[in-house]
Image (spheres, rainbow, N blue to C red):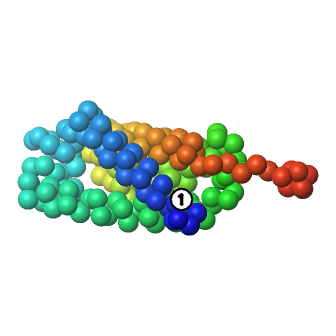
Amino acid sequence: MRPSARFIVKFIIVHLVTYILTGVIAFSTFMKELYTGPDALFATFLVTPADPELWSAMLTRMLPIQLIRGLLLGMVFYSLSKHLKRMSLRRRFIMFMGFYFLVGFLAGPAIGPGTLEGMVYMLPQYSPDGHFRVFFEIALQSVLLSAWMAKWMRTTPVTTEESNSK
């Protein structure tokens, strides 16, 4: 398997596992009341278990869409992989967190719960609790993904010539 394909497949696996694991943990512990019950905050704009037909359709679409998302993100991270391989484990973790969490979520242009744009433009009933919970869920997944990918990548030692040119 080509190195690019191997890296992207690894990223897709890590993305899917951390996405599903974090989603299950978050939904079963601190997110469920935002989706279900009489005051389900997210029911105003998201599919919820209250509509079993829509919920089932969402679950059917989730895996293929997350595979595509993992592929796209994996392609972006692969473009940085030669640089990432030369970094320490700690710096690789920081780079993954920086791009995945900070750029891809918190500072991203989409208006949604937990994002900086969402905190500005969403109606007040989504703040601060809804924002904090989504922020925490995405931060948790980002930490897991970043730690796993940073650890999983093989490092390339910096040559003497490269270190002298720094």
| Total numbered badges shown on the rendered structure | 1
> Is residue 13 shown left or right of residue 65?
right
Depth order, front residue of 52/162: 162
Q: In the rendered image, is residue 119 in sight?
A: no
**Percent x, y of residue 123:** 30, 52
**Percent x, y of residue 66:** 34, 59
Query: Outermost residue, top direction?
Result: 29
10 Å neighbourhood of mark 1: few (<14), some, or many (≥20)?
many
Q: In the rendered image, is residue 37 in sight?
A: yes
**Percent x, y of residue 140:** 42, 39
> Is residue 106 shown left or right of residue 27?
right
Depth order, front residue of 9/43: 9
- Vertical position of residue 144 compared to residue 105: above or below: above
> Is residue 119 shown left or right of residue 87?
left
Mark 1: which amino acid?
A: Phe
Depth order, front residue of 123/28: 28
**Percent x, y of residue 131:** 36, 44
- Vertical position of residue 155 compared to residue 140: above or below: below
Residue under the image location 64 percent in, 41 percent down: 89
Q: Quadrant of residue 51?
A: bottom left
Residue under the image location 37 percent in, 52 percent down: 16
Q: Secondary structure at mark 1?
A: helix
Residue under the image location 26 percent in, 45 percent down: 125
* Residue behind mark 1: 7
Residue under the image location 8 percent in, 54 percent down: 52
